[in-house]
Image (cartoon, rainbow, N blue to C red):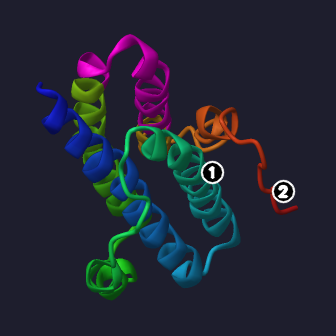
Amino acid sequence: MERTEYLRGVNEFMYQGEVLGEAILACYVSLEQNAERRYKWGTILQLETETKARLRPFLIRLGLSIAQDDTRERIADFAQTFASKSWPDHMKELAGITGFYLEQFCAIESAAPENEHEVAHSMVVHEAAIKRFAELELAGDSANSLNDVVAQLQYPLVKPA
């Protein structure tokens, strides 16, 4: 991967991916009626928010913009179909989306110069945690599904009683 393609990937997949993920999850938090599931969406939202903020200094160092893409149209599509999906359907969708981003992040990590490798690797760990959440939910291990996500949070949400 050439440097130009690498920088495009950092912006498009890493940063703008977090922008989109944050917007989708904020939408899901607002639409979810079940308190436990709202907490789970909210915890992943918290990871997206913290990660997006953590990426900003990295983008600035790379000479990239921290302007956020407008996600309203894309979010509208997710909002329209939210209620029609079961929890397993949401988890399958999340596993698929994170699988795609995980591939992108692995490619970016492979191309990252040594002084940028730590941030690139952190994004692989980040996305793998969300994918694992969805997979554990699908496997019925809801008690442990958020462990990898929560482990990355600086400001974890309080679990509802």
Q: Position of residue 152 (x, y in %)?
A: 65, 35
CA gap, disc 2 and disc 1: 16 Å
Specify the label residue 4 is tagged with.
none
**Which type of secondary structure does the marked residue at label 1 adopt?**
helix
Q: What residue is rendered at 26% in x and 52% in y?
A: 12
Q: Which residues are magenta?
A: 109-129
Q: How many marks?
A: 2
Q: Left or right: where does residue 121 sit relative to residue 76?
A: right
Q: What residue is rendered at 23% in x and 32% in y?
A: 103
59, 86: nearer the viewer: 59
Q: Position of residue 54 (x, y in %)?
A: 59, 44
112, 147: nearer the viewer: 112
Chief secondary structure of the magenta portion: helix
**Which type of secondary structure does the marked residue at label 2 adopt?**
loop
Q: What residue is rendered at 84% in x and 56% in y?
A: 158
Q: Amino acid at mark 2?
A: Val
128 is within the stretch colored magenta: yes
The relative height of residue 100 versus residue 50 in the rendered view (above or below) is above
Quadrant where the N terminus lies?
top left
Which residue matches tag 1? 50
Q: Amino acid at mark 1?
A: Glu
Tell me the crowding category of disc 2: few under 14, some 14 to 19, or many 20 or more residues within 10 angstroms, Cα based: few
Which residue matches tag 2? 158
The relative height of residue 114 versus residue 57 in the rendered view (above or below) is above
Quadrant where the C terminus lies?
bottom right
125, 109: nearer the viewer: 109
151 is within the stretch colored magenta: no
161, 126: nearer the viewer: 126
Q: What residue is rendered at 25% in x and 39% in y?
A: 7
Q: Quadrant of residue 65?
A: bottom left
Foreground label between 2 and 1: 1
